[in-house]
Amino acid sequence: MKLLSFFGRLPVREIKQQFYPPRFCCMMCGYEIFEGDLCADCLKSIVFNAGATCPVCGRKTAAEEICIECKARLPSYKRGVSPLSYEGGTLALIGAFKNGKPYIAYFLAREMAKKAALLPPADGLVYVPMTRKSLRRRGYNQARLIAREMSRLTGVPVLDGAVRKTGETSVQKQLSRAERENNLKTCFKADRAAVKGKVLLVVDDVCTTGATLNAVTECLKAAGAAAVYCVTAASVPHYKNKNIK
């Protein structure tokens, strides 16, 4: 009876983790591994952003220099970083995370926290928000899950509600660079009381053109944020990003 009473106070997700911890199986393919997060084959397929990167946006580049895009127009945020390159097995990993495997947030947050350590200390973590309609459709905000795990690892608080998304937008992957930027104009609103005077770290899953990160950064700066940095789980390599006009 006491055992039932104890588990009755736990959320269903925590009960499942007690008996079926995700780490007993590969997070991507489900292969039984008993330790770690990914099996050897899946881990080998993941592309880490470990080589040359742009010192501003953090994308994978051919040489350790500012990429052409940042030279042409600097992003609104001061600096961005990402532990993974959005190619190869990383595509499948992020796809699984966004479509029914929220526990992958643990793995991503751990890698992102390592990269975020290269940035100045932040006063708070701000995740890219979703509308209620989008949240109901997916069941969870993947950026919020990552932010919560990063907070647990780093001790930096998550500023829930610091940014709201005020309207639905078209699916970004179908849009050109200019369309992405236009699609996001005025759709984010920041809480001035929550962000004024603070150094903030914006958290998201993928940086493609940077349009979303720029839009969130701009609304934070308009609300009085002292400085804004960004960390994403993965970013599109510079040479692939050039194909998005």
Image: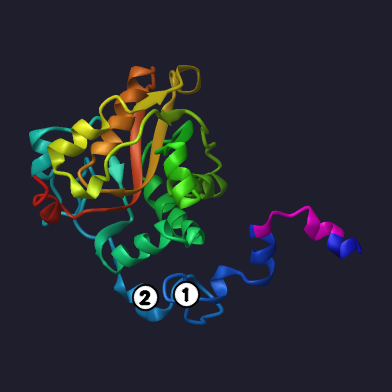
Residue drawn at (56%, 79%) of the image = 34
Residue 122's spot in the image, x, y percent? 44, 34
Q: Residues within 10 Å of mark 2 (few under 14, many from 20)?
A: some
Q: Which residues are magenta?
A: 5-12
In this rendering, the answer to whether 18 lies above or below 62 is: below
The residue beneath circle 2 is: 42
Type of amino acid under label 1:
Cys
- Asked if residue 14 lies in the magenta stretch, the reply is no
The one of 117 and 176 positioned closer to us in this rendering: 176
Residue 208, numbered label = none
Task: Indicate left or right for 196 with 6 as reference.
Answer: left
From this viewpoint, is residue 78 visible? Answer: no
Task: Indicate left or right for 19 with 210 as reference.
Answer: right
Which quarter of the rendered picture does the N terminus lie within? bottom right
Residue 125's spot in the image, x, y percent? 46, 37
Give the structural element (helix, strand or loop) at label 2: helix
- Is the magenta region chiefly helix, strand or loop? helix
The one of 22 and 58 positioned closer to us in this rendering: 22
Residue drawn at (52%, 38%) of the image = 156
- Residue 12 falls in which quadrant of the image? bottom right
From this viewpoint, is residue 204 visible? Answer: yes
Residue 164's spot in the image, x, y percent? 43, 29
The one of 46 and 212 positioned closer to us in this rendering: 212
Q: Could you give the CA–CA distance between mark 1 and mark 2, rounded to whole angstroms? A: 8 Å
Residue drawn at (39%, 28%) of the image = 166
Give the structural element (helix, strand or loop) at label 1: loop
In this rendering, the answer to whether 197 lies above or below 17 is: above
Type of amino acid under label 2:
Cys
Residue 26, numbered label = 1
Q: Residues within 10 Å of mark 1 (few under 14, many from 20)?
A: many
Q: Do the numbered discs 1 and 2 sit on residues whose CB atoms are within 8 Å? A: yes
